[in-house]
Image (spheres, rainbow, N blue to C red):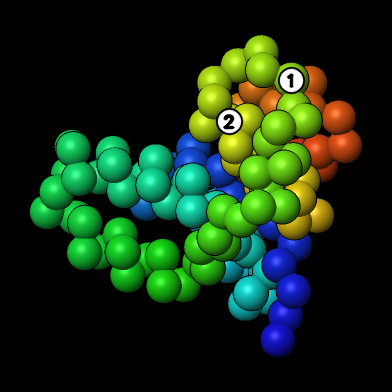
Amino acid sequence: MTEPLFLLDSNILIYVLQGSDCVASRRIQSCPVGTVVTSAIVYGEVMRGIVAHEPQRAHQVEQFFELIAVLPYDATAAAAYARLPFRRGRLDRLIAAHALSAGLTLVTNNEADFADVAGLRIENWTVA
């Protein structure tokens, strides 16, 4: 089984689901199966938005998440969260902690939101 390497942030998944970012879609498709995952926190964010604004797409989006594994948020991630600075949104801190605790690179288009998180590796897949 292939080990995960990258954790997708909600903004990347939203771009892909809307079909508005071909660069990110191509990058995801070029990665070996199992190396790209997301967090249960991100899953909740994305599904909340879909249910609130596009409920007719909920089933389609759930099927998409069968292709991108959703990592459960565990006690190790919670412990990493407890050590992070709280300068921005709580969900961003939870996502950063999850990536850190799992040793994954966070893929996001909001690099500035995570710049103060020591040790967090970040990549932006919306630029070629």
Is 115 on the left or on the right of 20, as rendered? Answer: right
Farthest top residue?
A: 87
Amino acid type, mark 2: Asp
Q: The N terminus lies in which quarter of the figure? A: bottom right
**Which numbered disc, 2 or 1, marks the residue closer to the eye?**
1
Q: Secondary structure beneath disc 1?
A: loop
Residue 18 screen position, x and y as percent: 34, 46
Above-or-below relation of 82 to 71 = above
Residue 32 screen position, x and y as percent: 68, 75
Residue occupying the point 80% across, 55% down: 103
Above-or-below relation of 23 to 86 = below
Q: Which residue is mark 2?
A: 92
Above-or-below relation of 76 to 45 = below
Label whose residue precedes the other's in the sequence (2 or 1)? 1
**Residue situated in front as seen by the camera: 57 or 30:** 57
Query: In the rendered picture of this protein, how many numbered marks are placed on residues?
Result: 2
Residue occupying the point 87% across, 37% down: 119
**Residue situated in front as seen by the camera: 40 or 108:** 40
Farthest bottom residue?
A: 1
Q: The C terminus lies in which quarter of the figure? A: top right
Residue occupying the point 25% across, 64% down: 60
Residue 120 screen position, x and y as percent: 81, 38
| Residue 66 in which image quadrant | bottom left
Q: CA distance from mark 2 to mark 1?
A: 11 Å
Amino acid type, mark 1: Pro
Farthest right residue?
A: 119
At label 2, counting other C-alpha atoms closer than 10 Å, the crowd grade (few under 14, some 14-19, many 20 or more) is some
**Residue situated in front as seen by the camera: 107 or 97:** 97
Can residue 68 be seen here? Answer: yes
Q: Which residue is mark 1?
A: 85
Can residue 123 be seen here? Answer: no
